[in-house]
Amino acid sequence: MPAESLRWDTLEALKNSPKGRLKYSDWLEKGEVMNIVGDEESSPDATSDVSPVSIPTPPPTISLLSPRATQMAGCILMCEEKHRAKAKMELALRQELQEKLVASVASRESEQLKRFEEFMELKQRQEFQSMRDMMDRETQESIGRQEKLKEEHKNRIKILNLRMREAEQQRLREAEFEKQRQVEGRERLRALNAIQEEILQLNQLLEQAAPTQSGHTPDFTSYSTRANQLCSQVSEVIRTTAEGEFPSVEDMTVAERALHEMRSVIRVMQDAAAQAQEKRKKEQEEEEDRRKFAELQAQKEEQKKSLQTKAEDTTLKWYQELQVSANQCAQSFEGLNNTKDLQTKKLRMELQKAATIPVSQISSISGSKLREIFDKIDKLLSGRPVVSGGKSVSISQHPNGLDFVSYKLAEKFVKQGEEEVASHHEAAFPIAVVASGLWELHPKVGDLILAHLHKKCPYAVPHYPPMKDGTSVEEYQKILGYRVEDGGVEAQDSFLKRMSGMIRLYAALIQLRWPYGSKQGPDPHGLNHGWRWLAQMLNMEPLADVTATLLFDFLEVCGNALMKQYQVQFWKLILLIQEEYLPRIEAITSEGQAGSVTRLKQFLQVRKCSLRSRQILPPKGQLSAHFWRS
């Protein structure tokens, strides 16, 4: 065993010795040959083949080696066998690598061939596309040139046609011009003949008129001489056109100027002839004017003396009848007012609220809201139940319910004019239109409204109540419309403000009708009552501060409606106010009361009323058609 281990050590030492490192191939000694194929001659399927070469086998010899040498030779053979197997393995690996290299080269060359073929196809297509684009461009250019030639040809044809038309039109214009010249020439010739005829007639008229003048009139010789000269001028123009030529415009101008001057000569002569007669006529007219002016002044003086201090008898009778009717109505529900029954008192309060609260809610917010209020009041007056304060109430719950509600309703309308309209003038129109609609359906309410209005504002009649014997000053002031409380009379400004509000309400009432009514019958209290009121106011002596205020308020609200209705008659009335009635108001107005007169004067002369244009501006707050659609 030790010897065997040393054997391998010995082989290793020999291998590492200088001679053991020498490389040599023993294939030829063993009769083996390796076929090596170069890279240039190899193919993808080529393989390396090692085949034995037949060498004559030497004759067997008799081994004379010792066992140790035999063992050594076996080891050497085993080592050689090991190296041979390793060489075969390396050869196989090299052959495999060579095959892979050949395969990759063949694959790369195949891909390059495909890319080259694709590139050639692309280049071919590009050349074909370029050629086709070039042919298309040439085709388009050819078509464009043809179109351009066609367009130029058409333009030349159009130009030729246009020139031909222009030439034809020029020829027609020249023919028309020549025709027109002939026509105008004939017209001028006829006009020239007519001028000559008229001048000769005027000259003959002048010669006939001159001898008939009386001695005190101016000498007409110069006129006759000038007329003969004008006739000679026209005759000269006629002679220049006798050769067949038509008279020119200058000839006509000379002839017309001569005719105009001839007419002026005749006119001057006639004026001179009629001057004396005109002077006498003017003197007669002046005398007649002086006589008429004197008569007019006398009439005015008579009219000034005859102005009334109270209303007409028919007006007073109407006023008293309304007051009697209102008093009778108040007496009819006196039992309801003075009742001690709690249930009846409660009913009275509910009826009063149902009548007065809707009137307080009247405004110009929207037409639909105003219609709801009207329908509610109409429903109450018609005897149908209405809801007030969350409770249902009806006038049929008491025998005198209708009289009570009508009276309180009319009283509330007048109070709204006294307070609401006095503060906000535009409020007169929505309140008045509801009152007018109720008046049309329930006439008794309208009469009660007038009665309350006349009682609080007697100037709405118009009526200036006289002071009767035995009447105290405070009582008389109450009759005139003043408020007297705790022994004190209200200030004049407060009084005028209330009167103004009620007159404005009345002025709006007479011009409005409920738009949803039948409108078949006459207006229950229309513009004719406004005309009557205005006429009677002007027939009565004015009151300081009061008359000017009420006239201004009435005309500002109702003036536009009266203007449209009465037209010329209305403007005559306005002129009467300006020229006669306003000076009478100014005569009784003190310095502290000049404000109302100034407002009236500005209204009539400057701001809203124009006699020259005959226009009065519509009042502010007037309800439009748009309002009723809101």
Image (cartoon, grey):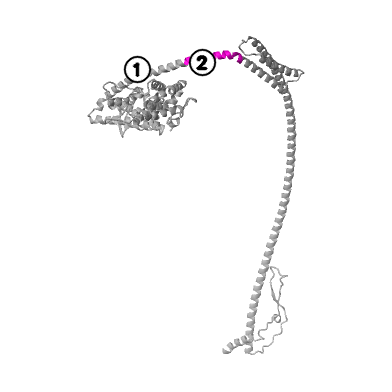
Q: CA distance from mark 1 to mark 2?
A: 43 Å
Q: Amino acid at mark 2?
A: Glu
**Which numbered disc covers residue 313?**
1
Q: Magenta span: helix, strand or loop, mainly?
A: helix
- Mark 1 surroundings: few (<14), some (14-19) or many (≥20) residues within 10 A: few
Q: Position of residue 446 (x, y in %)?
A: 35, 24
Residue 218 colored magenta? no
Q: Secondary structure at mark 1?
A: helix
Say which quarter of the image contains residue 456: top left
Q: Nearer the viewer, residue 306 or 168?
A: 306
Q: Position of residue 503 (x, y in %)?
A: 37, 27
The residue where tag 2 is placed is 286
Residue at the image point whose x is 60% and y is 87% from the top:
9
| Quarter containing the C terminus | top left
Number of numbered markers: 2
Q: Amino acid at mark 1?
A: Asp
- The answer to whether residue 148 of the structure is visible from this angle is yes
